[in-house]
Amino acid sequence: MTAVGARDGVDADGWRAATRAAAGVLVEMGAAAAGYPDACVRVVERDGPYIVLTKGLALVHARPEDGGLAVGVAATRLAAPVEFGHPDNDPVDLLLAFCTPDADAHVASLSALARALSAGLADRLRGAAGDAEMAAELGRALPEEARPDA
């Protein structure tokens, strides 16, 4: 089962704050340890803004051993977009954060999110009205066995 959450209208004064806010939702849900948001920031500091996958969308994550306690996915919509330094896909207004407890779940979660994004998940999240609707859209986008109500 996957923990699903969302936050709408988040204020962030840069990509680090946006990344910490997005991963912080996973911590609030109990899916990630307290240090996970900082681990997600370190990923971008070390590897660059490759997590900015498409126009305006970042996929926030770190390695399972960096604090993934369970499978969790969260959507965060920013009040104002932030720059990650990506040459083509900045600024970012929508962040999807995920965590997993092991490598197999990590790959499965990435795969499920990629399928959902190619099926229009980002547009549905941007069009959702508030936290609850965003979380519902995210939950519907996951494979049935991963949904929190399955």
Image: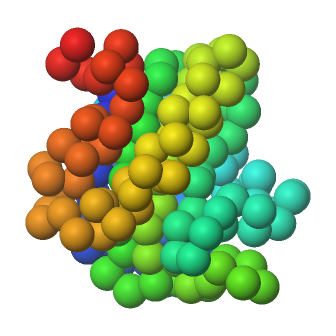
> Is the residue 69 above or below the residue 124 in the image?
above
Q: Is residue 101 above or below residue 77?
A: above
Q: Is residue 108 visible?
A: yes
In the drawing, does residue 40 fall left or right of residue 6? right
Where 108 falls versus 125 (above or below)? Answer: above
Q: Is 64 placed left or right of 68 in the picture?
A: right
The N terminus lies in which quarter of the figure? top left
Observer-nearest of 72 and 137: 137
Q: Is residue 42 left or right of residue 117?
A: right
The residue sitting at 37% across, 19% down in the picture is 146
Image coords of residue 95 (percent x, y): 47, 61
Q: Position of residue 51 (x, y in %)?
A: 69, 59
Q: Is residue 33 visible?
A: no
Residue under the image location 39 percent in, 25 percent down: 143
Image position, residue 16 (x, y; %): 60, 69
> In the shown orientation, is residue 98 left or right of residue 74?
right
Q: Quadrant of the C terminus?
A: top left
Find residue 87 and report its image quarter: bottom right
Q: Which colour scheme appears in the figure?
A: rainbow
> Which residue does the image show at 34% across and 27% down from the upper left?
3
Residue that protrudes farthest toward the right in the picture: 46
Q: Residue 133 at what x, y percent from top left?
A: 14, 53
Q: Residue furthest front?
A: 119
Depth order, front residue of 102/147: 147
